[in-house]
Image (cartoon, rainbow, N blue to C red):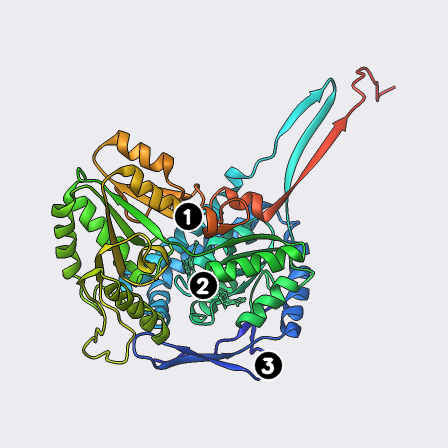
Amino acid sequence: MKYNEVQNFINGAFKSGSTTKTHSVISPLDGGELSNFKESSMDDLNEIVIAAQKAQKAWQKVTLKERVQVLYRYRQLLEKNSVELTEIIYQENGKIHSEAKAEIDKAIELTEFACSLPQFVNGENMEVSKGVYCSSTRHPLGVVASIAPFNFPSMVPHWTLVNAIALGNAMILKPSELVPISSQYIAKLLKEAGLPDGLFNIINGTQSTVENICDHPDIKAVTFVGSTKVAKIVYQRASNNLKQVLALGGAKNHIILLPDAHPDMASSNIVASMSGCAGQRCMAAATLIAVGNCDAILDKLVGDALKIQCGTTLGAVISKASKERIENYITEAEEQGAKIILDGRNTVVPGKENGFYVGPTIIDHATADMRVAKEEIFGPVLTIVRVKTIDEALAIENANPYGNACSVFTQSGGLANYVTENASAGMCGVNIGVPVPREPFGFGGWNESRFGSGDITGKSSIIFFTKEKKTTTKWNQEAGVNWMS
Ligand code: NAD
C-alpha cells in the first residue's frame, strides 16, 4: 500500500513542507513505507497563520447556528467515507479494522456534539443593581493549534478541531509524524462540506514544528495530547509565550479488583482494556491491583487473554522501537522475580513477519516498586500486584504520578464509591475497563496526565476555545417620552 506525499494544508490547498528534511511514514503492519513528507519551516507556519487570521475574522461574524451547518454536512461525509478512513487508520497505525472504525464512529459523535453547541453556549444576564444589567457573551480566540499523538490518528484531532471551528476559531493541526495520512482526508472532507478556506489547516513536522507553534505570536491557544515528557515541554514553552494551553500527558491506569467482582464482566472488560488498540490507549488498563483472593477471576482473565489472536483481534504496536521497549519491560520484570504467565515477546504473525507485533502479556506477582507496575509501557501488557486491603490498593494508585483513569470491579456499591472517591484520577470507572466520559462530559485526567485547567472535550471546550465578555448596561428608565409630539 502507498499513499501520496503527505502535505501541509494551507488556505484550502495542499502544499509540501518547504525544508529539505524528508520523513518516511512507516506502516506497523509490515514495516514498509506508506508515504513521506517534508518537515515544515517557520515560513510555512507564517503562511498558514496569515491565511487563518484572515479567514477567522470573517468566520467570527457568522452566527454559531450557521457555522455548525458545515459540520452537519461534514458529519454525513465522515459516515459516507468511513470505509476509506478506516483503512487509512489501519494502514498507518496498525490497529485492527474494528478499532479503526470505532475511531470514525467517535469522530462522528464528536462532530455531533459540536453541532449541538448552540444549545450549550449561552451567556448570562441579570439586573445587578436597580436599573443596571450585566450580561456575559462568549467570543472566539482567533487562531488556535492542536498537536496530536500517534495512537488515535482521527479521534484525537476531532477532540478539538470540530469544537474550535464551531466556536468561531481557525484551527492549525499538527498531526503525529507517525500517522499523518488520516488528517489529509479530514482536510479534504471539511473542504467538501463547505468549510471556508483557511479555517482548517495542517502543518506537518516533528519537534521543530511544535516549537514553532509554541513560539508563534499570533497563535492564541494550543492544545497538546501526547507523552507527559513532551506535554510538560509544550505547556511550559507555549505558556511562556503567553498562550492559553491545555496539555494532556501519559498515563498508568489502575484497575482495583475486589474478590466479589462479577467474574465474566470483570474478566472480559479488563482483557479488552489492556489489549484494545494493542494497549496503546491512554485509558488502557495497565496495573491490576488484586485485593485479597481474586484467583478465580484472574484464572478466567488469563483464559480470556489466551483467546486473543495477534494480527486478527490484536493489532500491531506503532514501531520497531516500541516493540523493543515493551519487550524490554517484560524481560526486566522477569529478571526482578515477577511471573510472566502470558508472554507476548517474540510474537510473529504468519504473513506479517515484518510487522511490529507484541502478543498479550500478563505479569503476575509484581511488586508496586517495579517499573512495570509504575511506568507507562504503552503495549498489551497487564501487570498484577497483589495486596490485602482496599486502602493498600488505593495507596499504590495515589502514589503514582499519573492520574488519567482508575476503575474498580466489584458488586458492592459502597466499596465502589469508596474507591472512586479516594482514587487520584480524573476519570473513574465502576465495572468499566475504559472509563471514557462521553459528551457533554469532558475528557481529562489529573496530576501528570494533564497540565492546564479544564478538559479537552465536552462543555469544557467552550471555556477553552472562547473568551468571555461582560457588558454592564444602564438605561434612563424614565417613561413617557412622546415621540409623536
Ligand atoms: P509524543 O509525546 O511522543 O508525541 C506527541 C506529539 O508531540 C507529536 O505530534 C510529536 O511530533 C510531538 N513531539 C514529540 N517530541 C517532541 C519534543 N521533544 N518537542 C516538541 N514536540 C514533540 O507522544 P506519542 O508517542 O505520539 O503518543 C503516545 C503518548 O500520548 C502516550 O504517553 C499516551 O498516554 C499519550 N496520550 C495521552 C492522551 C490523554 O488524553 N491523556 C491521549 C492519547 C495519548
Residue 230 percent across, percent down from the top left: 51, 62
Residue drawn at the location 51% of the way across and 58% of the way down: 231
- Mark 2 vs mark 1, foreground winner is 1
- Pointer 1 or 3: first along the chain: 3
| Residue 154: mark in rendering | none
Tell whether 9 sits left or right of 47: left
Query: Helix, strand or loop at disc 1?
Result: loop
| Residue 403: mark in rendering | 1
Q: Sort mark 1 into few (<14), some (14-19) or many (20+) by Cα contacts within 10 Å.
A: many
Residue 304 percent across, percent down from the top left: 15, 55
- Residue matched to label 2: 149
Tell whether circle 3 marks a residue whose Cβ is less than 8 angstroms from ligand 1. Answer: no
The front one of 328 and 483 is: 328
The front one of 122 and 447 is: 447
The front one of 444 and 344 is: 344
- Residue matched to label 3: 19
Residue extending farthest to the front is: 336
Residue 430: image quadrant is: top left
Tell whether 458 sits left or right of 370: right
Above or below: residue 117 compared with residue 247? above
Tell whether 37 sits left or right of 240: left
Residue 96 seen anywhere in this rendered image of the structure: no
